[in-house]
């Protein structure tokens, strides 16, 4: 079962294949996770954006994790 998930990058309509789970330690407690999804072209872009802010992040392949909430 694979609902179509579109890349979180602004203006991108490509199918996402990666999930980036991250949090901002300043405003999120340790249990909190934000999730972005990315197409292959934007994975590095989004990951670099978060890494530059020293946000903890984890990248997983879409569909391998069960916690993705991008579907209605
Ligand atoms: Zn994209």
Image: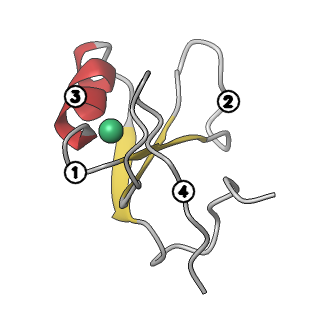
From what the image shows, is residue 60 above or below residue 64?
Answer: above
Name the residue furthest bottom: 1
Residue 40 is marked as 1
N-term mark: 1 or 3 = 1
From what the image shows, is residue 47 above or below residue 7?
Answer: above
- 3D distance between C-alphas at marks 3 and 2: 25 Å
Residue 5 is marked as 4
State the SS at label 4. loop
**Viewer-side residue, 26 vs 71:** 71
What is the x, y in percent for residue 2? 56, 78
From what the image shows, is residue 47 above or below residue 66?
Answer: above
Residue 29 is marked as 2
Q: Which residue is mark 3?
A: 45
Q: Which corner quadrant of the image does residue 69 belong to?
A: bottom right
- 3D distance between C-alphas at marks 2 and 4: 27 Å
Is the CB of the residue bearing disc 1 within 8 angstroms of ligand 1?
yes
> Of discs 1 and 3, which sits in the foreground?
1
Say few, some or many: other residues with alpha carbon within 10 Å of mark 4 (under 14 / 14 to 19 / 20 or more).
some
Q: Residue at x 43, y 40 (%)?
A: 13
Q: How is the image coloured?
A: secondary structure
């Amino acid at each position: 079962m694979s609902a179509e998930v579109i890349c979180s990058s602004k203006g991108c309509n490509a199918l996402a294949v990666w999930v980036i789970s991250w949090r901002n330690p300043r405003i999120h407690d340790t249990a909190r996770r934000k999730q972005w999804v990315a197409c292959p072209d934007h994975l590095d872009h989004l990951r670099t954006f978060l890494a530059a802010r020293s946000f903890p992040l984890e990248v997983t392949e879409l569909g391998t994790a069960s916690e993705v909430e991008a579907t209605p």
